[in-house]
Amino acid sequence: MLHDPAQLDLMFQALADPARRTMVERLSRGSASVSELAEPLDMSLSAVMQHLHLLEASGLVRSEKVGRVRTCRIEPKGLGIAESWISDRRSTWERRLDRLGEFLAEQSKTNPKK
Amino acid sequence: MLHDPAQLDLMFQALADPARRTMVERLSRGSASVSELAEPLDMSLSAVMQHLHLLEASGLVRSEKVGRVRTCRIEPKGLGIAESWISDRRSTWERRLDRLGEFLAEQSKTNPKK
DNA sequence: ACAATAGTTAAGCATCCGCTTTACAATTAC
DNA sequence: GTAATTGTAAAGCGGATGCTTAACTATTGT
């Protein structure tokens, strides 16, 4: 499964704002209404709504409205996508370090430091 | 070790751009000069330099200049910081799901569906 | 010495972001 | 029915972002 650049843009952009990360933190502890998400944030409800739009567009959060309250919850696959891009880079890096280590070990066997 | 919001801002912001992710991907395969980083990117060297500044400010990349070439390499701790924030959120979410599962299992034992 | 290479800095510019305020819509409580 | 609650939509604004070009510095090759 290849990484879709446009989605990664949206996802990392979404995580790049402290208010939005606060919302994700809150939602990782359980679903919440828009007002509940807004409560710890020092900004208008309207602003929170705009952050929520971004979070939904990125695929990190989904929500549904029942009556007059919209309930938001985490989309666990979303976090997985961002996490796996990072972890792919890390493992590429670490595999390379391993090979380098083996190479150096081999060097010091056939050509020990004087 | 608590997550520093300002650093997470810089880090996710850095990853939110396709050119910068391309640079990180390149560097995860090994160190590179600025020109090498620029090669696959359709923009001026100057623009690449600006992306590089951001990547260094975020702590994802470091570089040093020898002679007239600046060699850039990944800072593996950097990726770890972003990755661990995400994985902390995920595990909070998953632990919560587990508890919910246990609760529901308990419910159906003492109060089986009619 | 001169030219080519590799990088750096600064200014400028169009666009995007993160808010605000205002006005409005839908649901629920009294 | 009317008032309070909860959420939405639109317009506007200042500052941040992602480039460009142009001018410049430092190192290396001939």
Image (tube, coloured by chain):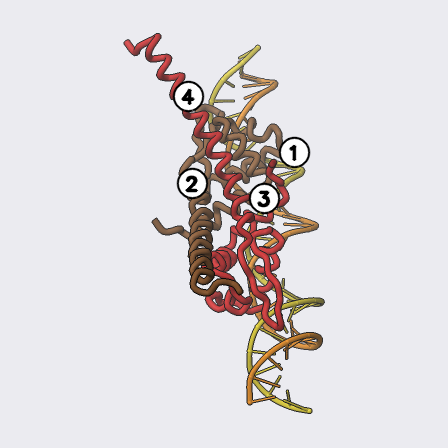
Chain colours: A brown, B red, C yellow, D orange
Image position of C11 (left or right of B65): right
Q: Secondary structure at mark 4?
A: helix
The x, y position of residue D13, in whole percent, is 68, 49
What amino acid type should be assigned to the residue bearing mark 1? Asp
Q: Which residue occupies 61% across, 63% down?
A: B64
Which residue is under mark 4?
A: B100
Q: Quarter of the image holding residue B98?
A: top left
Which residue is under mark 2?
A: A80
Give neighbour class at mark 4: few <14, some 14-19, many 20+ (Cα, 10 Å): few
What amino acid type should be assigned to the residue bearing mark 3? Leu
Q: Secondary structure at mark 2?
A: helix
The x, y position of residue B81, in whole percent, is 55, 44
From the viewer's side, name the closer residue of A94 and D24. A94
Q: Which residue occupies 45% across, 25% down?
A: B96
What amino acid type should be assigned to the residue bearing mark 4? Leu
Marks 3/2: CA–CA distance? 17 Å
Marks 4/1: CA–CA distance? 31 Å
Image position of A110 (left or right of C20): left
Spot the residue most to the front: A114
Give neighbour class at mark 2: few <14, some 14-19, many 20+ (Cα, 10 Å): some
Confirm or deny contact between disc 1 and disc 3 (CB under 8 A).
no
* Disc marking residue B8: 3
Mark closer to the chain start, 4 or 3: 3
Subunit bearing disc 1: A
Q: Is residue A99 above or below residue B37?
A: above
* Disc marking residue A42: 1
Confirm or deny contact between disc 2 and disc 4 (CB under 8 A).
no
* Disc marking residue A78: none
Q: Secondary structure at mark 3?
A: helix
**Foreground: disc 1 or disc 2:** 2
